[in-house]
Amino acid sequence: MRLFQRKGNDLIRQPADLIPCDTFISDPPLRYTKPHRQPELDNEQQVIYHAVLQHFSDPQLRLPVNGHAEDLQDSNNYSTLGDWEKFWLSRECILRYLRATAWNAEQTIRRLHNTLLWRRQFGLADYANLKETATSVANENDTGKISLLGYDRKSQLVLILKNGRQNTDPSFEQIRQIVWFLEAASILAPKGTECWTLIIDLKNHHIDNGGTRSLYEYPPLSLAKQVINIFQDHYPERLYKCLICNVPNSAWTFLKLVYPLIEPEPRKKILYNDPLEIHIESDQLGAEYGGRLDFNYDNSIYWPDLIQTVESRKKVQYEKFEALGANVGIREFEIKRNT
Amino acid sequence: MPRLLRRKRGKDEVLDVNHSRNSLTLQVQVHQARNFTINEAVCNPLCLVTFNNVTKTTKKVKNSTQPQWKSTLKLKLSNSPLSQYLRLIIYDSDNTNFLYLAECKISILTLFRTSRTHFKFTKDAQWYPMFNRNILREKNLSWMDPKALPYNFGELQLSFKLTSSNNDDSDTLTSFHLWNTKLMHNVDYEIMKKGVFSDDVIEDELDFQDVLDENDLLDVLKVDDLDQDMELAMDISNEDALSVDEEGDIMGEEEEAALIEDPEIFDTIGAVYGLDTVSLSSNASVSSSSSSTSSSISETPSISSLYSVEKGMDENLASLNEFHIYNGFDSTPSFPREYSTPNESSASLTQDQDGFRDEDDKKLLSRRRKRIPKRKRSIHSFEVSKREHSLGVVVMTLKSITNLPLVKKKMSKTGYDMDPFVIITFGRRVFKSSYKRHTLNPEYNEVCAFEVYPEERHFELVLKVLDKDAFSFHDKIATASISWTSLVGKYQIGEIMNIDLPLNLNKTSDEHNSVASLNFQFLPYSELKRHFWTNSLDSLTTQKDFDIVELGMLLEQIGQFTSNEINEFFHFYNKVPWSREKLTISELVVYLENWTENNKTSSPFNNIQTCPLCGRKVHKSRNVVNSKLNKENDLIAHFAICQLKRAHSRRTFLTPSYVSINSASRRWFSKFLIKLTYGKYALGSNNANILVQDRDSGIIIEEKISAHVKVGIRIIYNGKGVRSKKFKNLLRKQTIKQGKKFDAPSSVKYIPSFIRFHSLDMSECLEVEYKSFNDFFYRKLKPGSRIPESTIPGILLSPADCRATVFPTVHKAQEIWIKGRQFSVSKLLGDCPHKPQFTEHNSSIAIFRLAPQDYHRFHAPCDGVVGKVYNISGEYYTVNPMAIRTKLDVFGENIRCIVPITSPEFGTILYIAVGAMMVGSIILTCKEGDTIVRGQEMGYFKFGGSTIIVLVPHQKIFFDSDLIKNSDEMVETLLKVGMSVGHIPSQPEHPRIKKHIEDKVEIERIKRIITVTDENVSALGSVPWEYDQLKNLSTS
């Protein structure tokens, strides 16, 4: 029988020295390298960056209020950038878009426009709503299908998606939940990092679900498509690695279907059934993946704590942002607090 | 009835053993019951659980009003489920009688469902309300009716568990889902069989099933009782004997009772509650069964609304329907299973989402596909809406015919013998009704539905009444026709129009007013589209409005949409997708309706490949031979027809399964012989069945090859003969000899037999004394009988009464029609001085074939000046389509005469008269330098079939689209002199309008012009006149 067993199974054994943990780990371990600034831009890049910055710094820049670009000509339907939008339009953010478009200023502006419009539609233009969103999608996370836990070896956040813990029907709420997590992750990302590692766990956890089984063993393709689109369009250059683990045989069909929807660049970042220890140290990794964190998801503990952390970080960062002038293009590095 | 059922069940089980590796078992724990007796009377209750013909009982609890059974009953889920309802009945049992007390019905579909997509297969103990069906019936309520709640009758405590044979939870879900699909399939099938669509009836249907079970229940109870009650042990032998003896009686009595008192049980579906008290022996208890007045549900489906679909069964069914529909909408990748046919592996990878569902569908599909005939390769999928779609669908009901004439019996000449049937034709669609025995006023009530295409607007609907004869050929009784324009002219959309069509009798000896009455309804395409989307969305989902995620999931089932396309749905209505605004289902329908018009480049509906109703794929329309002329791979039109078929399933729904009127009126043995000797009888097929479409009426007419051509073809096909000098000489000699013979005055004697054989209509001909047969053969017509259709000089006219094929380039013609191996334009033109101007790629070609019976003079197609006539001598092969499509180069080798015409509109065109078998000579009545006007006579052929080829520089002409289309499908079109063939590019196509046919026997005449059938010959009792010549020819 050993012949047919997957190698991955060997790795999952319970280490003796478990670290109890039931909340979000607020800071990466100190032993990781100090946060470093991004390398400075060369002259050419500088010019392009400033062109983009110039565009968004223009106080006359007006975008449709409800995010629908083709909406009426009525000027009441347009408004200038809000403070939180300026907060979001940091130097790093613009650079991410520039990198995603291979330093094409025009394309960058268009994509940033699209994202700004989408954020207005989605209600992300104002971070004040973030907490409400969190409470309204709380039941989506009853089983902990998405969690932020630990840091990888580059002290980047680890976002874990557990497909097997799906507890609700596919709906708009699920997208809201994911988007909330992505926003939270961008706020919580430690100083000097802007990417995160994504673990997608395809193991069937239905036993944890109280015996309830879903007809959708994997998310419907359309939903997957929409999430992938949001991720690619509105969160470019955010993914460091996507680790897909515990892939059952039946999941390959789903993965094969999704694969062509992913752009070639992020496709390279996807790793299947890769040992997680390579990317994440064992004290930052859940025991179920062979790490030492004894993390059992409890929504009543984890969720309020996470909201709290996000809110407090948000507040601190915003204060710093105001202190720095509340403009477009402020460095996230300076806004974020030291660990 | 019960026996029958049981047998059927047994068979099903045998069949299903193969593909149910994993059987499901439903464990019902019956704990206790309370409050189910009215006056707390003491009884011995037992609980009987029945589900899809599987029945189990608990033990009976003696002297109790609050029985506690606490027993676990295991029921295997049937492999051919018919009902979703689990029925638990409480009986009061005293040794012999079982008195119905109360019952409880639980839908197994909702039982384990926790949310729309989540299932949990254990259900803890819970109280379920019971009802007494007698009470409900008095109140005239259904048990599901919320109004019935106050009449609930006690409660039953139950817990459930569903397990699969190997105890794996995921397998349970898979198997349960498979079971669901089967259930839906079966229910659908039942509905289809019954043709009833209303909500109640489905419910009743299920109940009916239960009622039928009652006899089974009785058996079960009996056996159980005998087992359980030790007191009866000593009487077992007695009892047994009795029951064996009496079984027949009981059955008889029960049936009788049922017939007398509850006719609705076995007769109509309306019956719900039959026997109240089931008894083992006593008559009394049988007769104590309900004497309710039968309120049979009217059987006719609600046709008032044309599309009565199986909507809103109940919420469950509808939501399950979602998966059922999946069969249609999903094609499957996923893993190979033993049921997959090789065909399925071709399904593309990009269309599914989760494995198990597809496997189920796959099984179902593969089972369905087995029923579809073998020709799998040619099965193509539907296109949701084709660009060249039809105008709409016509629904025609043939109601009745009144007052048919008496046709005396042939043998005895006494009495009449009339078994009339009707052939209905519109364009290429031929329907044949059933025949009614021995009546002069037959009632048919048969429905046919067909699409009408824009190019068919000048066609007409033709009815033909025939008398079925058992042994001889069918007798033609009457015909009637009505043109499409006059049909639609009077019609207002939405109504059902009654038409009384007077019939023209074939034997017009006595004045007889036979009238056919029809119902006509026309559903325009736009309406069909709306209808299609409304229905498909209804069957896909129960939701009424959609946010972007829900819309995405819905559209995923239909096809592949990009996210931009999904966003467009919202933008169209000025809504913002990501702020969770919703689209209503009606908005969705409107958008989808306009979709095909909005985006013509690509169709994203690629998941819709089969009809959601019948689950079938359809042959691609291009392949006319296979598709039997049905062009309905437009799903929207097909869906409408498919649904009409269901709506009218109580009546006979005719299918257009015939190629021509002739084939429809033929008996099976002639069909068999034709198939055997001539080859497949299909339009565009390359064999001895020559089918021609009449341009005026759209009717497909078959042209039988006269005997001498048959011999010619046979020689051509016989490889040895073709190239041999002997054969060529023979043909030449014979043709010349024939020509001489027919030029002789003595040949006049052949004329009457010729007229008779071809049933020629001589009324058009100029009446002169014919001096020889050839003189008759190139007879002139009365002036004015062939007037050019259009006076515009830019329109090219047909040069002869002929069967035409046209091709934009010679090259294309070579691909489709002219299969001669060595054929080329240069060979065709010989040493003609105009040769360099015409090549395969720059000249359009029109081929006009004249059959022997045709008017044999040819006319000018356009104005112009005749150039130098160039004669080429050659062979005398036949120009029959079969010969053209052999490897023999008929056009390049036959004798021919090239007439260049220099026309101001078309430039220099070449007008080539090709002689053929038996054509002695080509005589031109014009000469070089003559100025000819359109429609002017240019010459004539002496006896035989022949062809005129017209070569036109391709940039100078656009041929008429209907001709082009027919030619592409290898179908010749019947033309008359003066009809439009093509036009110069700057000139719009000549519109085809229906000439009103005032002539009564027009259709018959058209047919007579064309048809030379063996039947004619034998009917006339004469040997074909040229038969002797040919006999000589072939033997010498």
Image (cartoon, coloured by chain):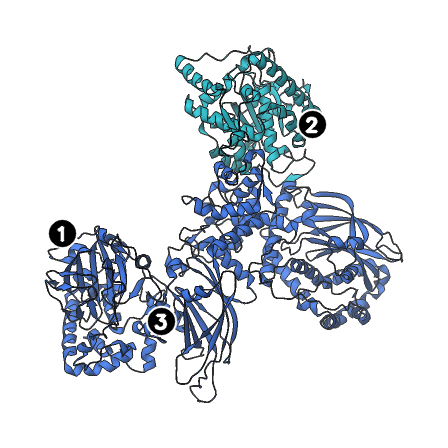
Chain colours: A cyan, B blue
Are callouts 1 and 2 both on one chain?
A: no
- Residue at mark 3 to residue at mark 2: CA–CA distance: 84 Å
Residue positioned 33% across, 80% down in the render? B1018
In this rendered view, identify the residue nearer to me: B429 or A211: B429
Residue type highlighted by circle 3: Ile
Question: Taking B147 as reference, is B838 left or right?
Answer: left
In this rendered view, identify the residue nearer to me: A318 or B1015: A318
**Residue B682 quadrant:** bottom left
Can you tell which mark lies on residue A299?
2
Q: Earlier in the sequence, mark 3 or mark 1?
A: 1
> What is the quadrant of the C terminus of chain A in the image?
top right
What element does badge 3 sit on? loop
Q: Chain of mark 2?
A: A
In this rendered view, identify the residue nearer to me: A84 or B436: A84
Q: Chain of mark 1?
A: B
In this rendered view, identify the residue nearer to me: B645 or B959: B959
**Residue B1021 quadrant:** bottom left
**How far from the left and from the top, in percent, is residue B524?**
47, 57
Q: Using the image, determine if residue B904 lies above or below residue B856.
A: above
> What is the quadrant of the N terminus of chain A in the image?
top right
Question: Taking B485 as reference, is A336 left or right?
Answer: right
Q: Using the image, determine if residue B70 lies above or below residue B659.
A: above
| Mark 3 lies on residue | B997
- Residue at mark 3 to residue at mark 1: CA–CA distance: 46 Å
Q: Chain of mark 3?
A: B
- Residue at mark 1 to residue at mark 2: CA–CA distance: 89 Å
Residue positioned 26% across, 79% down in the render? B755
Residue type highlighted by circle 2: Asn
| Mark 1 lies on residue | B836
Query: Which dot, 1 or 2, sits closer to the camera?
Result: 1
